[in-house]
Image (spheres, rainbow, N blue to C red):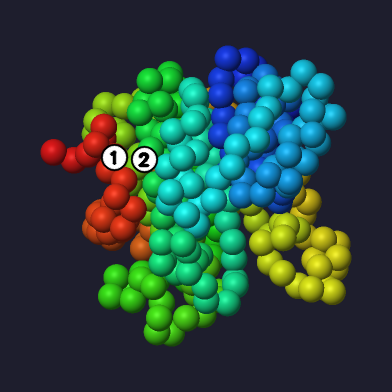
Amino acid sequence: MTSWTPASIPDLTGKSAVVTGANSGIGLPTALELARHGARVVVAARSAEKGGAAVETIRREVPSAQVEYARLDLADLASVREFAAGVGDVDLLINNAGIGMISRQETKDGFEMQFGTNHLGHFALTGLLLPKLLVRPGARVVTVSSDAHVVGRLDFDNLDLERGYGRLSAYARSKLANLLFTLELQRRAEKAGAGLISAASHPGTTATNIVKLGPLQPLFGLLFKSPEKGAHPSLYAATSPAIRGGEFVGPKLKILTPSESARSEELARRLWDVSTELTGVRFKEIAYS
């Protein structure tokens, strides 16, 4: 365990950060702390109303904050492309947004919603922003995963989960994909000689709206950690000088060991190839020759 707190974050003046899903949950305190320490922050979210409210919250806390809202719907690849085209410099990309344990739905492009949003949307966004990241010294990509990835399974013959859909199993699959992507991105960056750091985080059980409990939602908030504390692993992964590429930061800032499946290079490469085919986004700057 480290004595790190958000106060330990170094001066980020001159750096630009994109935080997906920064309108609520752990995304909002993540964006807030990055702005508090001098970064220019883009609050990326679907809803202009909620995104705008998050910007105002940050500005109330940090009157000098350089923060703006930009629309991003990770369940719509056209929206991902439009967002990426409109973003300026990017030093830090926090792939934070996520949905969990919903009934089976599909994205605008026809993908199973949890896999399409949590993994494919972020895969496409990272690839589209990669040229901007690679020209920034010390650039990092932090992707939020979960310990649920341990029970995740990938069936490439049933990626849309038209057979055997389960709310939790679909979520776990998307979180496994997040870790496979994190580790493969790091491997490719290293092989290409790029200075990019790709890391993952697991917030622990946090009182956010990713789980819908109806009238029991207030009880959820009493039993589990606050979004502010849940944001610590992401913030540490994004800013600590101690972080190394491919590390998975968990609660109490412990470096976690991903499951055997998540560490499989063969599985990661297959997922990468399938994700490239499905999204049309090619990481040509770090492609294997």
Rendering quarter of residue 266: bottom left
Q: Quadrant of the C terminus?
A: top left
Where does residue 67 sit, x and y in percent of width and height? 68, 27
113 relative to 263, above or below: below
Assess disc 2: are there few (<14), some (14-19) or many (≥20) residues with their C-alpha within 10 Å of its C-alpha.
Answer: many
Rendering quarter of residue 133: top left
97 relative to 67, above or below: below
Q: Is residue 45 visible?
A: yes
What residue would you read off at disc 1? 283
Asked if marks 1 and 2 touch (Cβ < 8 Å), the reply is yes
Where does residue 81 sit, x and y in percent of width and height? 42, 42
Query: What amino acid is at disc 2?
Result: Gly
Name the residue: 31% across, 58% down.
278
Q: Is residue 242 visible?
A: no
Assess disc 1: are there few (<14), some (14-19) or many (≥20) residues with their C-alpha within 10 Å of its C-alpha.
Answer: many
Name the residue: 59% across, 61% down.
99
Name the residue: 59% across, 71% down.
101
